[in-house]
Image (tube, rainbow, N blue to C red):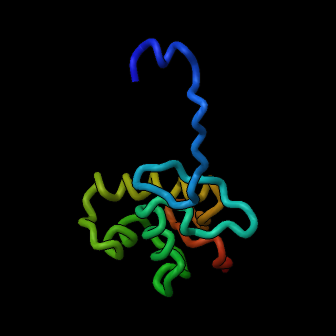
């Protein structure tokens, strides 16, 4: 696109979202009936681990890193913590205790 085209305004072609997520895309707020498949692949993997039997009691981010096959080094753990908190903020997961996450559908005891 040239500078003149940008300054001319938006094009008449409007693309509709397809409903499939791409890596690095924003996490949508969870709404009734929304499928987890709308999440980006990284977030979907985190959510699937949290929904598994191992995640039912809640998982710390170090445990989550190991379950995802990542090294439990600070850089990886902090990245997962950020993503887990984003899932909580958008209604996909719960933080049952400080630093302990589980899937939204699991009821904390």
Q: Tell me if 5 is positioned left or right of 30 in this view.
A: left
Side (left or right) of 65 relative to 7: left
Question: Looking at the image, which residue is at 36% across and 66% down?
Answer: 62
Residue lying at the far bottom in this picture: please name it.
53
Closer-to-camera residue (99/94): 94
Q: Is residue 89 above or below residue 54?
A: above
- Which residue corresponds to the image point at 40% horizontal and 55% vertical from the top-left? 23
Q: Nearer the viewer, residue 4 or 50?
A: 4
Q: Is residue 6 above or below residue 49?
A: above
Residue 81 x/y as whole percent: 44, 56
Instruction: Report the residue at 56% width, 28% height from top.
Output: 11
Kindly identify the residue that appears in the image at 57 percent across and 36 percent down.
Answer: 13
Q: In the rendered view, would you say 63 is above or below 54?
A: above
Question: 73 or 38: nearer the eye?
Answer: 38
Looking at the picture, tell me which residue is in the foreground, 73 or 93.
93
- Measured as percent of width and height from the top left, residue 79 is found at 37, 53
Image quadrant containing the N terminus: top left
Give the percent coordinates (x, y) of residue 28. Answer: 61, 53
């Amino acid at each position: 696109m040239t500078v003149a085209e940008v300054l001319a305004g938006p094009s008449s072609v409007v693309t509709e979202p397809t409903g499939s997520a791409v890596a690095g895309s924003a996490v949508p707020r969870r709404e009734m009936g929304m499928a987890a498949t709308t999440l980006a692949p990284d977030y979907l993997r985190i959510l699937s681990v949290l929904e598994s039997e191992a995640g039912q009691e809640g998982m710390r981010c170090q445990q989550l890193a190991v379950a995802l096959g990542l090294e439990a080094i600070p850089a990886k753990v902090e990245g997962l913590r950020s993503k887990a908190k984003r899932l909580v903020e958008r209604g996909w997961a719960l933080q049952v205790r400080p630093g302990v996450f589980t899937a939204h559908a699991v009821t904390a005891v």
